[in-house]
Image (tube, rainbow, N blue to C red):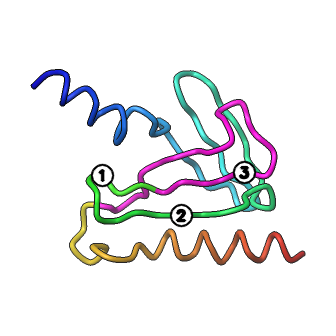
Amino acid sequence: MAVIGYVLMRFFVFDLVDEVWDAGDYLIFKDKGVEEMVRLDNIMNVSSSTFINPPRVTLSLRTPSRLGKKITFTPPGWMTPFNAFKNPIVDELIRRVDRARNL
């Protein structure tokens, strides 16, 4: 049971960053003492999965950061029943990334 629990945690929890802050034109990520700023125009793709617990948002970057080419986090407000299928914060992030790439 411990091995199965570890494997599940490794795939679903261990790769999540500790903190994400929205700073307008960029996002600030903090993970294990490393702080990284990622501009919205450096984000190539935003993908989200809502049918796993906790829900995950994965950002694929054009240029890798110190945290890697992909950064995964849990969106805020994921425990509310209204966000069971779509998270409005993720939808807004997708729109902002698209606008930043088109400027």
Q: Is residue 71 magenta?
A: yes
Name the image quarter holding residue 103. bottom right
Q: Is residue 47 above or below residue 87?
A: above
Q: Which mark is residue 91?
A: none
Residue 31 lies, in percent from the top left, at 54, 30
Residues in magenta, as a range = 57-78
Q: Residue at x 53, y 76 (%)?
A: 91
| Residue neighbourhood size for the residue with mark 1, other residues' Cα within 10 Å, grouped as few (<14), some (14–19), many (≥20) | some
Check the picture and name the quadrant holding the N terminus: top left
Does dot 1 land on a helix, a strand or a loop? loop
Q: Which residue is mark 3?
A: 61
* Three-letter residue code for mark 1: Pro
Q: Mark 1 or mark 2: which comes first in sequence?
A: 2
Whole-Å distance between the Cαs marked 3 and 1?
A: 22 Å
Whole-Å distance between the Cαs marked 1 and 2?
A: 14 Å
Q: Mark 3 or mark 1: which comes first in sequence?
A: 1
Q: Mark 2 or mark 3: which comes first in sequence?
A: 2
Please identify, in this view, whether the residue under mark 1 or under mark 2 is nearer the observer. Answer: 2
The reply to whether discs 1 and 2 touch (Cβ–Cβ < 8 Å) is: no
